Image (spheres, grey):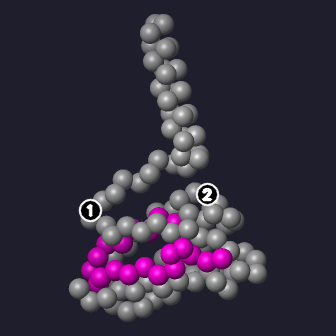
Amino acid sequence: MIMRRQCTFLLAFVASIAIAAGNGQPAAVAPSSDYHEFRLAASDSGFDPNTVTVKKGEKVRLIITATDCEHEFRLEAFDILQALKKGDPEIIEFTADKAGTFTFKSSIYCGKGHAKMAGKLIVGEP
């Protein structure tokens, strides 16, 4: 009984250290060879990076974190609209099934830098 409590305490302690080491962020998303993965930051100065380039037919995984306030990720060409809460990474997965250059943006006004809240998805032929 005492050993079980010690193990439970130890596991809770290790978990709290892991969360603190990650600045309170959830555990990293495991990479997948099935997806072309990109990590983006959203802030009132724009998306970083603001250009994502893939090939037609690729599965795409975007992991986007709003760093300063609530934003949104809108990619109309692929019917994607995702709210981005400050500090919470959001995972967006889709297949880039059409070639071209497509604009993504945030429609939530965030201050004077809001006009910079746009980027490009470039989908090239395979």
Displayed quadrant of residue 72: bottom right
Q: Label for residue 33?
A: 1
**Residue 65 location (% of width, % of height):** 56, 63
3D distance between C-alphas at marks 2 and 1: 26 Å
Q: Secondary structure at mark 1?
A: loop
Identified at 48% across, 85% down, the residue is 120
Position of residue 70 in the picture relative to residue 65 (left or right): right
Determine the main secondary structure of the stretch shown in magenta: strand
Identify whether 41 is placed above or below 6.
below
Task: Using the rendered image of the protein, determine whether residue 78 is visible from the camera's viewpoint.
Answer: no
Q: Position of residue 63 (x, y in %)?
A: 47, 64
Q: Find the magenta span and give its range.
A: 45-64
In reply to whether residue 22 is colored magenta, the answer given is no
Q: Residue at x 47, y 26 (%)?
A: 11
Identify the residue under disc 2. Answer: 87
Side (left or right) of 63 relative to 47: left
Q: Residue furthest top?
A: 1
Q: Amino acid at mark 1?
A: Ser
Q: As displayed, is residue 33 above or below residue 44? A: above
